[in-house]
Amino acid sequence: MTEEIQDGIYFRMPEEKYLAEDRLSKSGIKKMRISPADYWAESPFNPARKKRDTDALIVGSAYHCAILEPDRFAETYVRELDKSEMPAGTLFTGGEMKEWLKENGLKQTGSVKEQADRIAEADPSQPVWQTALTEWQASIKPGQIAISPDLYDTLIMDMERVHSIPAIHSLLSGGAAEVSVFWTDENGIKMKARFDYLKNDCWIELKTFANPAGKNLNQCLLDAIRYNRYYIDAAAYMEAAEAIRSGSLDVMGEAADGEREIVAAIKQRASELD
């Protein structure tokens, strides 16, 4: 049984821990508006509910980290080694290594690692995939997450594009990312929300959208808001921000001085956050 999270403001809470907490969120409200059965199907009350796609969760977390926390992205995620970027003449398969060993009059038996080590000892300049992969794996720091080269390169490109726009870079600076807030509303309902980015005067929610039909951009955005019911998201975040501003919630767990200053500034505000 997981430990119950107390009402409060949490910085750097793992997303899995936030999701596991049994409280009503914007996602739960959307499901409840469809039907109680839809809400129950994906709630902790359903013993047969499907777990979230781990790969999709990693992609989503990596994208948020790249856009909202570029510095942490560089520390947390690493680019997987790409076979296509290995130099010409690289030995990739066991058969290729055995053939090379045979041509150079060397022993061909043993494990893949033993064969690779034998080649490296005989000719350090000969590129071998197994050797390069072993060295790359050894370079990964504890806790780092490897993602595919295509995804990594796309995230870097999007990160640079977004932060090259002064107005957006300003919005995504001077605040805190992935801030989890737990509170009890006026009806006694246990609530939760997780701000993508929280500042002392506003909150920012990062969304992506597609436009396969080639609609006018404004129409596409309006349709995305209606279809995905983002107005419910906005209401939930506004309520969470007001719970902070009311002064009834404290910072729980570890928090940097700058993060505590954001909360203090919100509590001193005379009006709602933007």
Image (cartoon, grey):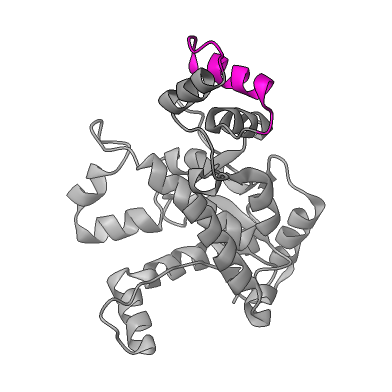
Question: Can I make out residue 184 in this image?
Answer: no
Query: Between 111 and 46, which is closer to the camera in this rendering?
Result: 111
Tell me the quarter of the image containing the C terminus. bottom right
Q: Quadrant of residue 116?
A: top right
Q: Is residue 118 magenta?
A: yes
Residue 174 falls in which quadrant of the image?
Answer: bottom right
How many marks do you count on the picture?
A: 0
Residue 225, position as x, y percentages in the image: 35, 75
In this picture, is 161 found above or below 110? Answer: below
94 is higher (above) or lower (below) than 51: above
Q: Is residue 215 above or below residue 267?
A: below
The reply to whether residue 41 is visible in this rendering is yes
Residue 21 as seen in the image, left or right of residue 156: left
* Residue 211 located left or right of residue 169: left
Residue at 25% from the left image edge and 80% from the top image edge = 213
Residue at coordinates 62% horizontally, 32% vertically from top-left? Answer: 126
- Residue 184 place in picture, x, y as percent: 49, 50
The answer to if 115 sits in the magenta stretch is: yes
| Residue reaching furthest to the right | 257
Between 88 and 37, the residue placed more toward the observer is: 88
Query: Left or right: 96 with respect to 33?
Result: right
Q: Nearer the viewer, residue 242 or 260?
A: 260
Picture coordinates of residue 256 (x, y %)?
78, 49
Q: Nearer the viewer, residue 167 or 36?
A: 167
Span shown in magenta: 105-125
Q: Is the N terminus in the top left, top right, bottom left or bottom right quadrant?
A: top left
Give how far across and how far down residue 115 sits, in percent. Answer: 54, 17
